[in-house]
Image (tube, rainbow, N blue to C red):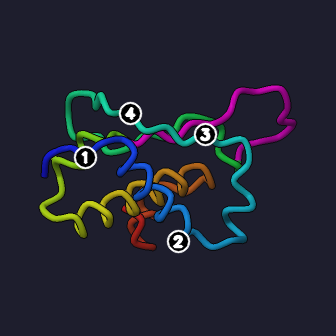
Amino acid sequence: MNPIDVDAFEVLVAEALGTIPAELRAQMENVAIIIDDESPPGGLYGLYEGIPLTRRGTYAGVSPDRITLFLGTICQSAMTTEDLAHRVRVTLLHEVGHHFGMGEARLREIGWA
């Protein structure tokens, strides 16, 4: 699928955020979600950068954690609009899982990979 515009992609991201249970969303503090329309080479859909909640001790005065979603890569992996929405959701949930300290095996186990 060809890349969609950033505004349309933001709608998909907002819808995906809305599927995260409220009790988990409430614990997502100091996290910025970034849409990168200049995807890096390779097949990376998303990237979490920060200190997972499970590793935080004294935590003050730090920059927000970042969840970056790579618009071009995600769009290229999708065949339909529905497939695109699903890929955005899974990618976002995957990176949110890393924010909560989940590893790849656990993310696959719960369907977030």
Q: Which mark is residue 19?
A: 2
Please rate how many residues cluster around mark 4, counting C-alpha atoms within 10 Å: few if below 14, some from 14 to 19, many from 20: some
Q: Is residue 3 left or right of residue 104?
A: left
The three-letter code of the residue at mark 4 reads Asp
Q: CA distance from mark 3 to mark 4?
A: 12 Å
Label 2 amino acid?
A: Thr
Task: Write the residue at 76% across / 27% down.
Answer: 62
Are the residues flagged by discs 3 and 4 in contact, CB closer than 8 Å? Answer: no
Q: Amino acid at mark 3?
A: Ala
Which numbered mark, 2 or 1, is in the foreground of this view?
1
Between tags 3 and 1, which lies in front?
A: 1
**What's the mark number on residue 4?**
1
Q: Is residue 31 above or below residue 80?
A: above
Say which label, 2 or 3, has the lower sequence index: 2
| Percent of width and height locating residue 26 | 74, 62
- Tell me where the magenta segment starts and ends, as one range: 55-69
User: Quadrant of the rendered structure where residue 11 is?
Assistant: bottom left
Q: In terms of secondary structure, where does tag 2 sit?
A: loop
- Using the numbered discs, state the Cα–Cα distance from disc 3 to disc 1 in whole angstroms: 21 Å
Q: Which residue is mark 4?
A: 36
Q: Position of residue 76 (x, y in %)?
A: 16, 47
Is residue 110 positioned above or below 32 on the image? below
Q: Amino acid at mark 1?
A: Ile
Tell me which secondary structure the magenta stretch mostly adopts. Answer: loop
Query: What is the x, y in percent for residue 16?
Result: 47, 63
Q: Is residue 61 magenta?
A: yes
- The secondary structure type at the circle numbered 4 is strand
Relative to the observer, which residue lies in front, 16 or 6? 6
Of labels 2 and 1, earlier in sequence is 1
- As drawn, the label of residue 32 is 3
Helix, strand or loop for disc 3? strand
Residue shown at 50% from the left, 58% from the top: 14
